[in-house]
């Protein structure tokens, strides 16, 4: 019985090997057919939908060639001039409060950060004006630094 069992296993092993080789060959042949456009099969729903425009939908991707630009004016609300307060846009030093108000040119997605770590007391800042189309940060939005950095958030433009 032992020899017959092992012969049976060897036969199944050969069949399995042939089956795997045939499947691999079919895979290679089908891949070659999928490279030719006239013979290409549309196997997925997503490929069939490709190129069909969405009706009355706001698209997530805007025109990448045009970067919408705006301006945000920030004012020191609690003191007159604090020259060591630094404003960062996307992590890059952009301005400091040499005057009571600063005007920042911004684009969509820019993050505005105010660094008040140089002063050991709370300082309040206010967004005093924004250009047309800027919906975040809003006018009169206030943040307070207390020996810390605070973020005004990411700029959003309509």
Image (tube, helix red, strand yellow):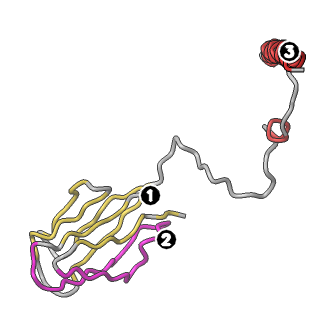
User: Which numbered marker is on residue 146?
Assistant: none
Disc on the earlier residue, 2 or 3:
3
Disc on the earlier residue, 3 or 1:
3
Q: Give neighbour class at mark 3: few <14, some 14-19, many 20+ (Cα, 10 Å).
A: few
Q: Is residue 120 magenta?
A: yes
Q: CA distance from mark 3 to mark 1?
A: 73 Å
Give percent across and percent down for residue 107.
41, 55
**Image quarter hosting the N terminus:** top right
Give percent across and percent down for residue 104.
29, 62
Residue 85, visible in the rendered structure: yes
Give percent across and percent down for residue 2.
85, 20
Please say if 95 is above or below 25: below
Q: Which residue is mark 3?
A: 3
Q: Secondary structure at mark 3?
A: helix
Magenta segment boundaries in residue numbering? 118-146
Answer with left or right where residue 3 lies relative to residue 109. right
Please say if 137 is above or below 60: below
Residue 22, visible in the rendered structure: no
Counting the numbered discs, the total is: 3
The one nearer the camera, 98 or 28, is 28
Q: Quadrant of residue 35?
A: top right
Labels 2, 3: front one: 3
Q: CA distance from mark 2 to mark 1?
A: 12 Å
Q: CA distance from mark 2 to mark 3?
A: 82 Å
Q: Which residue is mark 2?
A: 135
Q: Which residue is mark 1?
A: 109
Labels 3, 1: front one: 3
Labels 2, 1: front one: 1
Q: Is residue 137 magenta?
A: yes
What residue is rendered at 51% in x and 45% in y?
A: 66
What residue is rendered at 28% in x and 73% in y?
A: 150
The one nearer the camera, 140 or 13, is 13
């Amino acid at each position: 019985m032992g020899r017959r069992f092992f012969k049976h296993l060897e036969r199944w092993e050969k069949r399995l090997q042939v089956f795997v080789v045939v499947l691999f060959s079919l895979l290679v042949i089908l891949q070659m057919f999928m490279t030719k456009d006239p013979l290409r099969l549309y196997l997925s729903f997503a490929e069939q939908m490709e190129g069909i425009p969405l009706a009355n939908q706001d698209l997530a991707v805007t025109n990448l060639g045009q970067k919408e630009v705006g301006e945000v004016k920030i004012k020191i609300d609690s003191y007159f001039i604090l020259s060591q307060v630094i404003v960062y846009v996307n992590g890059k030093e952009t301005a400091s409060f040499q005057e009571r108000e600063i005007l920042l040119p911004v684009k969509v997605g820019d993050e505005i950060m105010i660094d008040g770590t140089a002063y050991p007391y709370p300082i309040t800042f206010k967004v005093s004006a924004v250009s047309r189309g800027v919906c975040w940060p809003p006018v009169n939005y206030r943040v307070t630094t207390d020996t810390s950095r605070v973020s005004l958030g990411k700029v959003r433009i309509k």
